[in-house]
Amino acid sequence: MKSIKCNKSSAIQELFVYPLEGKCTVMYNNGNIYEYSGVSRRAIFSILTNDKQSIGKWVNHNCKTKGVTCEWTGHESPWMSEAEVLQVLKEVDEVLLPDFV
């Protein structure tokens, strides 16, 4: 997992990319957190190697496209600091539901 800070973006606070899995997690400035699966690995490597690329345009072009699934994973908690939320994101690989669900 690689974190990309988005200081210049009006919509995105931070982008977490998982190049080998073809996934990325986007933390928006409004606190919403979304995970995108099925993202082009080539596009992920592109954003990692081109720091002049607009993060917002990259997300719109590569995450909000046909074949990519999106899942809302939460909202930044008022009871947790940003650092704590980021630590939770780094530790969670998948959510395991009970058998009866």
Image: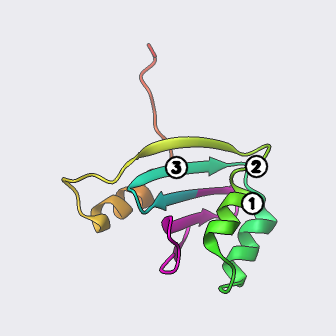
Q: Is label 3 in a helix, a strand or a loop?
A: strand
Tell me if label 1 and label 3 are in contact, CB under 8 Å.
Answer: no
* Residue depth check, mark 1 versus mark 3: number of the one nearer the observer: 1
The answer to whether residue 71 is above or below residue 4 is above
Q: Position of residue 50 (x, y in %)?
A: 71, 84
Residue shown at the point (41%, 22%) measured from the top left:
98
How far apart marks 1 and 3 lie (CA) works out to 15 Å
Residue shown at the point (61%, 43%) measured from the top left:
70
How far apart marks 1 and 2 lie (CA) works out to 6 Å
Residue 65 numbered mark, or none: 2
Pointer 1 or 3: first along the chain: 3
- In the image, the segment drawn in magenta is 1-24
Q: Position of residue 90 (x, y in %)?
A: 44, 61
Residue tagged by mark 1?
Answer: 61
Total number of numbered labels? 3
Q: Position of residue 59 (x, y in %)?
A: 65, 62
Residue type of the residue flagged with mark 2:
Thr
Q: Quadrant of residue 29?
A: bottom left
Is 34 on the left-hand or right-hand side of 41? left
Is 33 on the left-hand or right-hand side of 67? left
- Name the residue furthest front: 10
Residue shown at the point (79%, 43%) measured from the top left:
67
The N terminus, quarter of image: bottom right
Residue tagged by mark 3?
Answer: 34
Tell me if label 1 and label 2 are in contact, CB under 8 Å.
Answer: yes
Residue shown at the point (74%, 59%) measured from the top left:
62
In the image, residue 38 lies in the stretch drawn in magenta: no
- Name the residue furthest left: 79
- Asked whether 21 or 57 is in front, the reply is 57
Density class for disc 3 (Cα within 10 Å; few <14, some 14-19, many ≥20) is some
